[in-house]
Amino acid sequence: MEKQFVLISDSSCDLPAELAREKEVRVVPFYVTFDGEQYFKEGVEMSGEEFYERAIGDPKTIPKTSMPSIQDFADAFIPVVKNGEKVVCICISTKFSGSYDSARNARELVLEEYPDACIAVIDARVNTVLQADYVLEAVRLRDQGFSPEESVERLLAIRESGRIFFTVGNLDYLIAGGRIGKVASVAGSVLGLRPVITLKEGEIFASGVGRSRRSTLSKCAELLVKYVKENNAVPGEWVLDIGYGADHEEALQFREQIITALHEAGFMIRPEDIPIFRIGAAIAVHTGPYALGVTILKKAV
């Protein structure tokens, strides 16, 4: 079936490079720095493995990221437009980054030279591995022959259904990244408490605390089950995955915990139906090396 558009996303989508190539998703990278001077393109000049090795090896240094520039997006759009193809570009939530604004400005720049170009830019209202789910739904729409207009309409219709229920290793990265305000009311500076956090509608919200990793992960599973029940979610109509930072083995164990909790709630799902994706630098600079969570999103079609 002929594909009606080319799909582009920023690297917050955290699609593994091989999967992005397989699904023909073009990725515009964020930039990451550990010293504020030398910036590396995420996934191009610095791999996920290198990022986490440095973050864990030097825990006192909190890395930072910089969004893709207008020119970065223009450079991604122009070859597509010159080839006579249409673009759908999906960007991280505007509550976390100005990547969407860069893409929108790049669109206007390209339209000055190519006024007939068709470029749609979407604020995903999600990020990291939930953005991967969102982008993969766009892939399914594209591969089934939906037009850019139809695809954007369907993507916007499911956008608010996305959730991430997650926890972090400690609050250091949330504090340094300026995200602590949303969880301070429950976690604050109380010694030993770990936050449970929900991402929805593009923002993070406090959803509880625990004194151990086990208790916070159990709370994440409970929140997922509650959300599934509230939405009368049916297997096959929703997509889920696990997002992790540095510890893949823990992610595998957490997936089993999630499957058990869902089965007990009557939501029958297999391990192969819950992919495990690594959280990239664009989000890990806010959540730290030991973020772990579960995502859910309604399918677009």
Image (cartoon, helix red, strand yellow):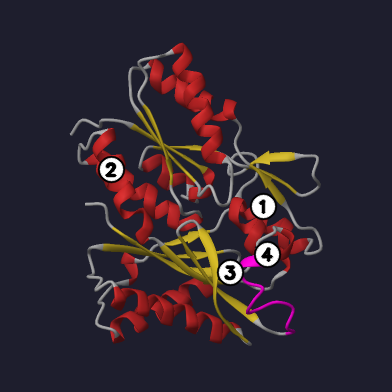
Residue 236 position by quadrant: bottom left
Please say if the residues under marks 2 and 1 sit with CB atoms less than 8 Å apart: no
Which numbered disc flags the more N-terminal residue, 3 or 4?
4
Q: Amino acid at mark 2?
A: Glu
Q: Quickly name the residue at label 1.
A: 50
Q: Quickly name the residue at label 4.
A: 174
Which residue appears at 27% of the width and 39% of the height? 142
Which numbered disc flags the more N-terminal residue, 4 or 2?
2
Name the mark nearer the viewer: 2 or 3.
2
| Range of residues picked out in magenta | 180-191
Q: CA distance from mark 3 to mark 1?
A: 14 Å
Quadrant into which the N terminus falls: top left
Q: Determine whether the residue tagged by mark 1 lies in a helix, strand or loop.
A: helix
Which residue appears at 21% of the width and 52% of the height? 301
Which residue appears at 61% of the width and 44% of the height? 42
Q: Position of residue 127 (x, y in %)?
A: 49, 54
Q: Amino acid at mark 4?
A: Leu
Q: Quickly name the residue at label 2.
A: 153
Q: Quickly name the residue at label 3.
A: 247
Relative to 245, say whether 39 is above or below.
Answer: above
Please say if the residues under marks 2 and 3 sit with CB atoms less than 8 Å apart: no
Q: Amino acid at mark 1?
A: Glu
